[in-house]
Amino acid sequence: MPRHAPTLVEVARAAGVSTATAARALGNYGRVKESTREAVKRAAESLNYRPNELARSMITGRTQSIGVICADVYDPFFAAVVRGITDVARGRGYTVLITNSDENWHTEVESFGSLQSSRVDGVIMAPSDPDRVDHLRAWVAEERPLVMVDRASSRLETDAVVVDGPTAVEAAVSRLFDDGHERIAIVGEFSPQSAVERLFAALAQGDEAVHPFDLSPSISRLTGYVRAHRAHGFPIDPALVVRSGAYTVEAAQIATSVLLRSDPPTAIVTTDNSMSLGAYRAIRAAGLRVPEDVSFIGFDNQDWTEFASSGISVIDQPAYAMGQEAARMLLSRIDGNSEPPRIVTMPAAFIERGSVAAVR
Amino acid sequence: MPRHAPTLVEVARAAGVSTATAARALGNYGRVKESTREAVKRAAESLNYRPNELARSMITGRTQSIGVICADVYDPFFAAVVRGITDVARGRGYTVLITNSDENWHTEVESFGSLQSSRVDGVIMAPSDPDRVDHLRAWVAEERPLVMVDRASSRLETDAVVVDGPTAVEAAVSRLFDDGHERIAIVGEFSPQSAVERLFAALAQGDEAVHPFDLSPSISRLTGYVRAHRAHGFPIDPALVVRSGAYTVEAAQIATSVLLRSDPPTAIVTTDNSMSLGAYRAIRAAGLRVPEDVSFIGFDNQDWTEFASSGISVIDQPAYAMGQEAARMLLSRIDGNSEPPRIVTMPAAFIERGSVAAVR
DNA sequence: TGGCGGTGAGAGAACGTTCTCACAAATCGC
DNA sequence: GCGATTTGTGAGAACGTTCTCTCACCGCCA
């Protein structure tokens, strides 16, 4: 029993040929006599030979692997994205390296470095802060493939796959106005506070002053909330912009509880699935009923939204398809496609359930 | 702007030393004068040098990466396991390659081959069929690290991290008997049918005749159902052993719908999270209320179980901790630990909610 | 002054592939 | 039947590291 995995040299020796010939026979390239080819393949088979991808990669400069930096694989949204990526990658013979950033910029930088060292052929990532992308500059400048998913950055020209969150939120909030709601709260990460203030200042100068891709997902979705208010002629009450400060269910629950204790709104919308779950838990903990006491529109079609109360209406993102699309775009770049970067915006669907009631 | 990533040779040249010295300076080994070391580090810094892990791996024989074969990263159980693995791996400087088997043996074999080619230092996997593990033999025989998670196999001596599913299910079913239920259904994948028959035949000869690790998770959990029946002196009604035949929510929903149309049981238990969701959807679709019309105990503490009906009581697996433990065991093997293989059984918790009612 | 231990650094092999080049043998065209 | 082309094969460089040798140099002591 060999202590070491068999190498091409051993296969070649067993078949009585040179390593060059063995490589040709197994790699199906160059000229090899049919009988030789078969002898080599038999030898490889009997030794249970597997080519060492590392050595191959050193020569070819390609590792047949792609790296993924997501916020958290355990989050259902990213889990679906990752599944979409791995399915496409596997179909094309690529392996996938997964890392989590936890929306922490330093972790993201570290992960990106680790993926670079692993010499992945391309990277798909959800940048934790679209404003701080300098660590990606060198990579992009050398025309190495990079696709952003869930977010884009106007500060860096790359491919991206996003959902039009602002428009989806605007539609949801408008729908609540149409049902007679006037005090509508929005629960999001909205961090840092200064970014929120910058957004309001910019929006005061007109829509053109704000580029949605300079914003984190939650703040970009807040623009939809603002737009709906303007369209319906309602001012924004800062007390109803509920800032959790972190992308966690717990933070959202605490922030929403505080809101509900003071002067409860008649409706609540959220900006992602963690915020939705946290906000809904807070509503339940406060003893309020949905939609009798408060209307609610969540983000992402998670399993629990189907059963909670009489069903929670949600903004549904095509997460799996986004992952697939991101992987396809990346592989196309790896294959040499050098067209200008493209931002693919995928449609969010509104799933109507029973969590919105008209105001009396 | 270099078309190629900078190499050690370029760093060495920039610092005016040999590659050997540059390697020593950056790798913090051997003897290097302090001033030289700093000059090299400065040069590396300014060139934005990153060691090529591939080349390093060729020499050291270690890739600092581990492979994971799970059924489906999108499944909340495996997503949590994977998160546990990646967290531990990252802390120790390892990257993680993720693949999905979809519980398909051929896909598993292919994934395993791909991981071998990638020369991962170790593998963590949920074997799709504990009976068919021959493709892992050579790997294990060469003492390469392999840890199984969620399942083990008596046919192959390896480390494993599992939950005592049979005991958890036995406790759940016993609890239903205590509440006066006599017609208790169990919904599981239970495939192939012959395996179920083999189990019943073996159990007829006594508990000793059946080794839980020769069984797929769902069938092993079925043993708990059988044990509870024997302990309470009830015969097994084959019509109440509901076989979905696939690990999908849809299959579970269809199989459960069929059950409910004929002669509904007074209680239902399930063997994993997909079965739980499918069964619960079928209950709702049939217009039945939980627990008034039918009592229900699910598997895995998913978000929806908190809100559905008046809360679903569940058997909760410590998925994240299982992933962490599996990663720790694997890394310990990679570090050279050669103690005999160990099977770590982690406790499942019973989370009591409002989905079980006493029978009138 | 000569031997010796310690320090710092370079030359070059090794890892397991791919790939270019060279070349012998076989086949072909006329 | 002789040059030209095709076919099959091997030698050896290359990829970017790590790591083992080797060696020059310095200071110290006898």
Image (spheres, coloured by chain):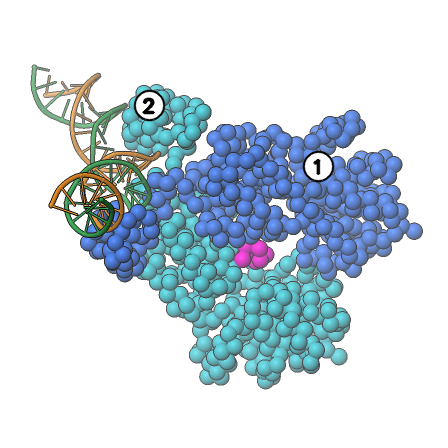
Chain colours: A blue, B cyan, C green, D orange
Location of mark 2 (residue): B13
Question: Label 2 vs label 1: CA separation?
Answer: 48 Å
**Where in the figure is residue A5, as x and y percent of width and height?**
29, 53
Instruction: Name the residue at 54% across, 67% down.
Output: B165
Identify residue for label 1: A219
- Is A80 situated above or below B260? above
The quadrant in which residue B51 appears is top left
The magenta-colored residue range is B72-78
Is residue A295 shown in magenta? no
Residue B73 magenta: yes
* For residue D23, side relative to residue A263 (left or right): left
Q: Position of residue D28 (x, y in %)?
A: 19, 19
Q: Quadrant of residue B268?
A: bottom right
Badge 1 marks a residue whose secondary structure is: helix
Q: Nearer the viewer, residue B76 or A36?
A: A36
Q: Image quarter for residue B319?
A: bottom right
Relative to residue B144, is residue A40 drawn left or right?
left
Disc number for residue B327: none
Q: Residues within 10 Å of mark 2 (few under 14, many from 20)?
A: some
Q: Subunit of mark 1? A: A
Q: Quadrant of the C terminus of chain B?
A: bottom right
User: Split into 4 quadrants, where in the image is the N terminus of chain B?
Assistant: top left
Q: Is residue B176 above or below residue A241?
A: below
